[in-house]
Image (cartoon, grey):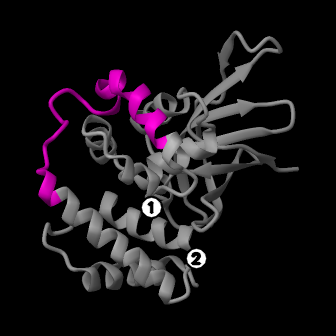
Amino acid sequence: MRLRLPCATSILANSSGNRTIPLIGRLTGTLIEIDAEQAFLLLDVGGVGYELEASTNALAAAPAIGETMTLSTHFVVREDAQLLFGFCDSAERELFRTVVKINGVGPKLALAIISALDPATLSVAVENNEVGVLTGVPGVGKKTAERLIVELKSKLQDLLPTGSIGQHSESSRSIQQAVGQEAQDALVALGYKPLQAQQMVAQLQQTEDLPEQITTEQLVSMALRNAARRGINP
């Protein structure tokens, strides 16, 4: 029997919902299965298969099938489900925890947000009230974006280490976002699903040392090569 859980930090709430108990904070095991489109990993830990919903960074850092992988995790227990979320490290897990505390943001939406927006982009969007950046994340509407900005204003230092906010110019950020969106649109036109396209581009932007002046065509080509290596098809 396999356990289906969302990966990153773990919380077990009692029936009153007033207390949380840390549980399953990290897993190390053999990677058995990976599905980038569904943001899913299956990890064999001592003969038990853990199904995790993983961040884009965790998926991008995944080794080959059959190799060992370590993830920081967040375990959520509800009346109707047990969810385990996986993250590439404890810092990403803490970012997830910060976002998921916002009213109206569940763990799945929090995972989508931190997968689509790196900490620098999220911090600048909050600092400059850039609602459009947040509504670009699937599942985030205007009202939710506005709530995120208001509630995260006081948590900017939780999103990024001191001194990191605003390290990139506004114009450079805007260009990079525009190129990323154009690349996503191009991938969708090639047959990939919107979520697939978003994750393919986000993986490159967050894990590769891309040139500041990268073109849409270059980004699409890199995304297609990366997808081919990982066996991701439209």
From the viewer's side, name the closer residue of 133 and 75.
133
Q: Could you tell me if the residues under marks 1 and 2 are in contact, i.e. CB atoms within 8 Å?
A: no
> Where residue 187 sits in the image (x, y, percent)?
45, 82
Most extreme residue toward the front, as rendered? Answer: 143
Total of numbered circles in the picture? 2
Q: What segment is highlighted magenta in the picture?
A: 145-172
For label 2, the crowd category at 10 Å Cα-Cα, with few meaning under 14, some 14 to 19 and many 20 or more, is: some
Residue type beneath disc 2: Lys
Residue annotated with mark 1: 60
Mark 1–mark 2 distance (CA, rounded to whole Å):
18 Å
Q: Is residue 55 left or right of residue 120?
A: right
Residue annotated with mark 2: 193
Q: With respect to residue 17, does 225 lie above or below?
A: below
Most extreme residue toward the bottom, as rendered? Answer: 190
Query: Is residue 164 located in the magenta-colored stretch of the structure?
Result: yes
Secondary structure under badge 1? helix
Secondary structure under badge 2? loop
> Where residue 103 sits in the image (x, y, percent)?
58, 28
Q: Is residue 145 left or right of residue 129?
A: right
